[in-house]
Amino acid sequence: MAVLPLLLCLLPLAPASSPSQPATSSPCPRRCRCQTQSLPLSVLCPGAGLLFVPPSLDRRAAELRLADNFIAAVRRRDLANMTGLLHLSLSRNTIRHVAVGAFADLRALRALHLDGNRLTSLGEGQLRGLVNLRHLILSNNQLAALAAGALDDCAETLEDLDLSYNNLEQLPWEALGRLGNVNTLGLDHNLLASVPAGAFSRLHKLARLDMTSNRLTTIPPDPLFSRLPLLARPRGSPASALVLAFGGNPLHCNCELVWLRRLAREDDLEACASPPALGGRYFWAVGEEEFVCEPPVVTHRSPPLAVPAGRPAALRCRAVGDPEPRVRWVSPQGRLVGNSSRARAFPNGTLELLVTEPGDGGIFTCIAANAAGEATAAVELTVGPPPPPQLANSTSCDPPRDGDPDALTPPSAASASAKAADPGPPTDRGVQVTEHGATAALVQWPDQRPIPGIRMYQIQYNSSADDILVYRMIPADSRSFLLSDLASGRTYDLCVLAVYEDSATGLTATRPVGCARFSTEPALRPCGSPHAPFLGGTMIIALGGVIVASVLVFIFVLLMRYKVHGGQPPGKAKAPAPVSSVCSQTNGALGPTPAPPAPEPAAPRAHTVVQLDCEPWRPSHEPTGP
């Protein structure tokens, strides 16, 4: 009994557990180092040779480093219930797949490193749940597609987005424009060929934009660029400056990049790739006056078209300029024509009317515009009544209609009047096309001595049935050129341009000398029936019938000859039959009698009862009975 009071006295002296130490702890994964003695908890497994995320992770960890392993996928259960995780590094693994909702429980995560993996796309549900994410590093993957909603959950918190060294040709620019808190945006070393205007206008906190080594030929001006000074190097730059890097792109140095050339920069990486006169020159060494554009010139348009109602019609318009002009069409009613249920407008300048109606006729206007100006051309469309039904056996020698792309249009009074009504490209400067035959034409133009420093002439032409513009470079001392390899029966639009050196800027420029329209002679072709395949089949059937009839007649002749010669081939003796049955006609007489020859046909006579006695007949050399 004395022992019990002693134990009660010693009980308060037992050490209490430290409140800062975790009550329970999960075992540390093999080959990993775990910091579990104090909060926050850390699990460090870099270069541990892991093939998957360890299942025995402490779910209370605030830091998880799994870089430089061989993890191929992140599954839904790998990071479940890790609600306190703040930093996750999965860099330099072999991750090809991230399950939808794999990060759904990581609502406190601030930094996610997925660089150096093998991701090819990022969908809308793979980053779901990252509502507090600040840093997202996706560089050095194989990303070719980024879904528009992939960054929705972290759009308001993201500060650093790195998409460099991927295979991105397009980006969800509207989604990127909602990243209002982003400071650094890395888009370098991708395959981006264009950036829409105003793509960064809402990124007011953007401090660095890297678009190095893409396929950009131009960079459109952005309101963000005009509000902040642009610098190429962050060293010594003010806090409000925007560091813009765009070296390593094939920049086309024309008037569209004058805004960038006017900025005070300290960069030595950018260079011009085109036009040829500026190719390879240092971007900041090119004078502002050398960033020039050329206004559009319409080089080809469709001749007047006449189609019956209900048929399709294709109107073509081609233009050249720097930058490449954009072609639009205006209907005879003055409305802009675009893609609809009855019309399709193509980027190459072709307007296709799928089904024409009588109200579609009139003058269509082609407008080619770029940053230097615009040019217009008129195309007349006539919509006639529907064609009458064609008879099945009708033939025609008429040439195809001019609206047919493969038409070989011979000259006629109708085409001559149409050409007189539509003079085509201007010819008031003396460009003439003479001596044109079926496949060749001679082009002549006057001397251009008023233009100093002419280096060469350029001839460009195109036919009404071809979308390809053909160029010919002619020496400066030439005043004529013979075009060969033309298609017969085609209408061509041709322009001559003088290439000279501008004395004011020292650059190579072009000036139109004049344009002309001509038609090659039609190729001679025989008049044929539109139903030639059917006629050919009929001829084959008739010939086969003649052959079969000839064979039947031949067989019939053979049979008749065989019958005449007694069933033996002609020229052979008839072999005696050993025994046969012969029926002789008797009038009551006894004994056999030879069979009489076949009587000649005679008039019908009265019926007579005749008795026929039939006996076996034997040859004459055999003895007969008594």
Image (cartoon, rainbow, N blue to C red):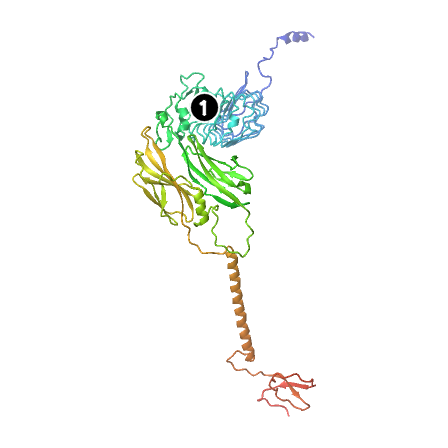
The residue lying furthest to the bottom in this view is: 626
Quarter of the image where the C terminus is located: bottom right
Question: Would residue 437 appear left or right of 386 to someone viewing this image?
Answer: left
Question: Would residue 355 appear left or right of 378 to someone viewing this image?
Answer: right
Which residue is painted at 61% across and 87% down in the image?
A: 596
Q: What is the x, y in percent for residue 225?
A: 45, 22
Which residue is painted at 51% across and 80% down in the image?
A: 572
Q: Is residue 436 above or below residue 611?
A: above
Q: Is residue 176 above or below residue 15?
A: below
Identify which amino acid the numbered label 1 is placed on. Answer: Leu
Which residue is painted at 41% across and 44% down in the image?
A: 492
Comparing 474 with 593, the one in front is: 474
Q: Quadrant of residue 1?
A: top right
Q: What is the x, y in percent for residue 326?
A: 46, 34
Q: From this viewpoint, is residue 408 visible?
A: no
Comparing 433 with 496, the one in front is: 433
Comparing 121 with 270, the one in front is: 270
